[in-house]
Image (cartoon, coloured by chain):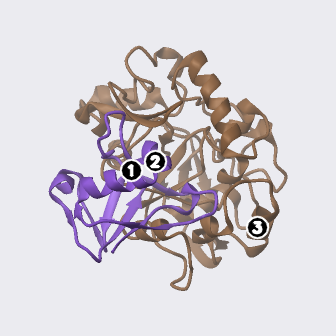
Chain colours: A purple, B brown
Amino acid sequence: MVRIVVPTVWTPQGRTDFEGSPGPLDEVVRDFVARHPEFGRRLLDADGAPLRYVNICIDDDLIPRHLRTAATVGPDAVVTILSPMAGG
Amino acid sequence: MGEMRRVPGGVFQQGTPEWVLDWLDDADQPLPRLWFADETPQFTAVVAPFRIDRFPVTVGEYARFVRDTGYRTEAERRGFGLVYTEHGWVERDGVTWYAPGGPGTGGTEFADHPVVHVSFTDAREFAAWCDKRLPTEAEWEFAARGPDFRIWPWGDEWDAGAANTAELHAGPLTSLAAWQQWWRVECARRGPVPRTSPVGAFSERGDSPFGCADMAGNVYEWTSTSSRLYADTVRCDPTVAMAMGRYRVIRGGSWMNFRYQVRCSERMHGDPGGWSSFAHGFRCAADL
């Protein structure tokens, strides 16, 4: 099962870990939003495309924006959503 | 270019003490203790004497750099920049340092405001042009509060009239919902244009012990320091932990923030790979 990690402050309860499905990275993000629409405005643009300024790590690798569409998430991967400005 | 202050070297406890985390825990603010853990533990830092800009770099100063060099910022080359609308962060075409809310915004009235929409590289290029550099994180914090701990550059008592924060514009804020309501009204009235203020507008009331202005609020400021935790044992937000070694430290908070994000020891971490926004600027430093 894919584990998706978001910032503590994205939920009122401070939950950071969610389950996702493996597949192409953009589809993993869209599927995650479909399951949790409250994150839609943070991850997708008005046309439903993943926002490119939001960084994404698969396991320990930060995926460069120009490689995002070709990236694939394996079945046991950890996907970390990393805002361009973290913390605060 | 830019008035500078001489800061004597010193030894200080960089970071946030536990009593401030306790105070944040008890305060009527929405963020959990874990969110601030990257500011801890305090550790002994040593800074050599240096000079630092009294003010953030202004639009007028950046314009001179561009006129002199023909430099184009990363947002200009990319064709869009980030602004915060009533719907959240949006990539908007034509947003640049000279049009901070998009085409038709900006103008001479912003000449003495801090420049925004400058990436880490854009800031470093400017600094090199005027024979300066970005401050390190330690230099920035030392310049903001001096050798003794204080929450804000002027002291430990919050003063809404001493800095350009969201609380200056909206009054006391205690929740994200209240902030969003304020910003919705602002966007409806003027659009998503940064609410920066002329540099030094809060001097001397908001100045640091070394006379530096706008170190709390106005614009977030890039430092040269690569993000890292202050100790290997720190347990912090997992996404903030992922920024370590990848991002650069940003200090000072901005006009978008509550009082809690403009503290002298508050840390943020910015993507140095070309990212910028309408609330991000910088100031320069130099060796003596």
Q: Nearer the viewer, mark 3 or mark 1?
A: 1
Amino acid type assigned to the residue bearing label 3 in the image: Val
Amino acid type assigned to the residue bearing label 1 in the image: Ala
The answer to whether the residues at label 3 and label 1 have Cβ atoms under 8 Å apart is no
Q: Farthest right residue?
A: B157
The reply to whether residue B49 is visible in this rendering is: no
- Residue assigned mark 1: A34
Q: In this rendering, do the residues under marks 3 and 1 share a single chain?
A: no
When the figure is inspected, residue A33 is found, relative to residue B184, above or below; the finding is below
Could you say whether the residue bearing mark 2 is in a helix, strand or loop? helix
In the depicted view, which residue is nearer to us: A1 or B17? A1
Residue B20, percent from left and from top:
76, 67
Q: Which mark is residue B259?
A: none
Categorize mark 3 by other alpha carbons within 10 Å: few (<14), some (14-19), many (20+).
Answer: few
- Residue assigned mark 2: A37
Q: In this rendering, do the residues under marks 3 and 2 share a single chain?
A: no
Q: Residue at x 54, y 40 (%)?
A: B56
Q: In this rendering, do the residues under marks 2 and 1 share a single chain?
A: yes
Q: Is residue A25 left or right of residue B275?
A: left
Q: Chain of mark 2?
A: A
Q: Quadrant of residue B3?
A: top right
Categorize mark 2 by other alpha carbons within 10 Å: few (<14), some (14-19), many (20+).
Answer: few
Q: Which mark is residue B20?
A: 3
When the figure is inspected, residue B31 is found, relative to residue B175, above or below; the finding is below
Distance Cα–Cα, label 3 vs label 2: 35 Å
Q: Residue at x 40, y 30 (%)?
A: B97
Could you say whether the residue bearing mark 3 is in a helix, strand or loop? helix
